[in-house]
């Protein structure tokens, strides 16, 4: 018999059945009052997830499309940006800047650590001509969450815009766009929002709009001025991903019913259980500070290749967890605990890691991590 598949990766995540099945409904035309009503409703409900009064725009693209939109609409060729690079997704901000001839100053530090407010303060002092700071809420490649609240507090009265990639952490980690003074937030559908891949979201503050409206070059497909004009008429400039928008309505209802604060709490508990289980197995956590609630990054013992373990678990047992990315690709595994991953999925994931490690020659006592996780997850 084939294996049942368990996905415990930091995107895409499993999707609730009522969300999945919505995609089987007949296609509705998008230039209709029926579609506009749904579009208006999801655009409003997204504000709750972002914790903002700003409009939230929806692109048919993966999350990176919203990142590109932020760069293209805010920055003009030759202008200067500050880019926080503590992992693969921070590096991506730099890559997008490079693609558009934007002069960027990187803030580099060791992977596994968060950026410190002092580092941003120093970069802004040295580069007063910078127009924006591009950073990340959860740097998914290292499993570290940055202290955006403190960064936003520091940047509150600065002329620069604060732009945050919250693709993995929205609806997972505590985050309040307006209260934390974040100007632009980007997110994606296949992570905490529990949809299939294919939608990107971007929310833009008034301060950011002042910058964007003064810019001559603001792109074509990812053009925010065009999105704003169309959203005012409850539509999009180009064909939206109609089925995904219908699914989004169902997913947002689940999130509203659950309540953001409850979601934050649940993810925190699952992350705590995963970290303690890893420690009980004698493994080291890769995140040295601010370990995320999106995924737990765990260092592999010497002689165990991360990719060998993830391949074994996926191919032999149907359990998919992630290895690392970039410079730590083969050194860590990442177990995700967000989206529609629940407590018992996590039990499966921890059990699979115990079994796989034993089979690859790292002898751990079976059930040792599980016992710790069960106690925490179910308050035993
Ligand atoms: C997943 C992820 C992305 C990339 O999103 P895509 O949907 O693959 O384009 C960017 N940033 C972070 C922090 C992510 O977790």
Image (spheres, rainbow, N blue to C red):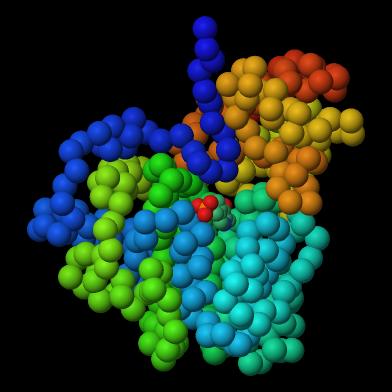
At horizontal 31% and vertical 47% (from top left) the residue drawn is: 244
Q: Quadrant of residue 179?
A: bottom left
Task: Please give left or right for residue 231 compared with residue 285 in the image.
Answer: left
Residue at (54% x, 67% y) in the render: 164
- Residue 291 seen in the current view: no
**Which of 115 and 19 lies nearest the eye of the viewer?**
19
Quadrant of the drawing holding the C terminus: top right
- Whether residue 142 is visible, yes or no, is yes
Asked whether 203 or 53 is in front, the reply is 203
Image point (63%, 21%), residue name: 315
| Residue 254 rendering spot, x and y as whole percentages | 32, 42
For ligand 1, give the image quadrant.
bottom right
Residue at position x 48%, y 72% from top?
Answer: 70
Which quarter of the picture shows residue 96? Answer: bottom right
Which of the two residues, 271 or 80, is positioned nearer the viewer here?
80
The picture quadrant where one finds residue 270 is top right
């Amino acid at each position: 018999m084939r294996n049942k598949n368990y996905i415990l990766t930091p995107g895409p995540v499993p999707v609730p059945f009522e969300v999945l099945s919505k995609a089987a409904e007949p296609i509705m035309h998008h230039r209709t009052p029926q579609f506009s009503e749904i579009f208006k409703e999801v655009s409003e409900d997204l504000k709750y997830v972002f914790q903002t009064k700003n409009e939230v725009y929806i692109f048919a693209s993966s999350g990176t499309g919203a990142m590109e939109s932020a760069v293209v609409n805010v920055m003009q060729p030759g202008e200067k940006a500050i880019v926080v690079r503590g992992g693969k997704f921070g590096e991506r901000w730099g890559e997008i800047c490079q693609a558009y001839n934007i002069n960027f100053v990187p803030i580099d530090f060791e992977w596994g650590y968060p950026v410190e407010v002092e580092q941003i303060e120093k970069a802004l002092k040295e580069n007063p001509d910078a127009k924006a700071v591009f950073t990340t809420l959860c740097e998914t490649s290292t499993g570290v969450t940055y202290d955006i609240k403190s960064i936003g507090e520091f940047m509150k009265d600065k002329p620069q815009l604060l732009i945050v990639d919250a693709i993995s952490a929205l609806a997972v980690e505590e985050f309040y766009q307006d209260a934390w003074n974040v100007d632009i937030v980007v997110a994606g559908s296949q992570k905490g929002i529990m949809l299939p891949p294919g939608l990107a979201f971007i929310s833009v503050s008034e301060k950011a709009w002042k910058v964007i409206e003064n810019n001559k070059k603001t792109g074509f497909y990812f053009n925010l001025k065009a999105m704003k004009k169309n959203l005012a008429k409850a539509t999009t400039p180009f064909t939206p991903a109609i089925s995904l928008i219908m699914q989004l309505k169902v997913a947002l209802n689940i999130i509203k019913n659950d309540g953001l604060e409850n979601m934050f709490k649940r993810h925190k508990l699952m992350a705590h259980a995963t970290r303690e289980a890893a420690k009980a197995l004698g493994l080291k956590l890769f995140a040295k500070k601010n370990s995320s609630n999106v995924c737990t990054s765990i260092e592999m013992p010497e002689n165990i290749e991360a990719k060998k373990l993830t391949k074994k678990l996926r191919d032999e047992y149907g359990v998919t967890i992630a290895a690392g990315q970039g410079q730590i690709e083969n050194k860590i595994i990442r177990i995700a605990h967000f989206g529609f991953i629940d407590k018992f999925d996590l039990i499966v994931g921890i059990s699979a890691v115990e079994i796989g490690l034993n089979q690859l020659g790292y002898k751990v006592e079976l059930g040792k991590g599980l016992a710790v996780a069960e106690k925490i997850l179910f308050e035993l």
